[in-house]
């Protein structure tokens, strides 16, 4: 897990929008997208779209189109990885 991914997970104990993650992590949007993509591929994060209570399965082909309008939450595996680092 990279430092950026650790910082992202640090903000995902509750459902959080992409916009809020940008502000809280201070990462540029492309770096945040890349970090979220990596965390989703590791199943450390779940995504929600179009509302914070509608889980969206991660698909590599459509992620870029909805990434900035989605909400995110750390999974149990993600929280465990974050807390044991």
Image: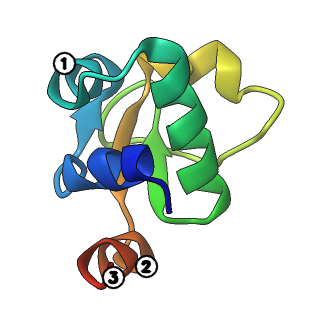
The residue where tag 3 is placed is 80
Q: Secondary structure at mark 2?
A: helix
Residue in the image at 66% along x and 14% along y = 65
Looking at the image, the residue that sits furthest to the front is 3
Residue in the image at 45% along x and 14% along y = 29
Residue in the image at 43% along x and 26% along y = 70
Q: Is residue 63 above or below residue 53?
A: above
Tell me whether circle 2 and circle 1 mark residues in contact (CB < 8 Å): no
Residue in the image at 26% along x and 28% along y = 21
The residue where tag 2 is placed is 77
Tell me whether circle 1 and circle 3 mark residues in contact (CB < 8 Å): no
Q: CA distance from mark 2 to mark 1?
A: 25 Å
Q: Is residue 2 above or below residue 19?
A: below
Across and down, in percent, residue 33 comes to 54, 27
Q: Residues within 10 Å of mark 3 (few under 14, many from 20)?
A: few
For residue 23, the mark is: 1
């Amino acid at each position: 897990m990279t430092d950026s991914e650790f910082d992202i997970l640090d903000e995902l104990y509750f459902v959080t929008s992409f916009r809020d993650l940008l502000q809280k992590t201070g990462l540029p949007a492309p770096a945040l997208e890349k970090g979220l993509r990596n965390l989703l591929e590791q199943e450390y994060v779940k995504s929600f779209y179009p509302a914070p209570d509608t889980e969206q399965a991660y698909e590599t082909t459509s992620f870029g189109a909805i990434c900035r309008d989605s909400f995110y939450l750390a999974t149990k595996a993600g929280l465990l990885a974050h807390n044991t680092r």
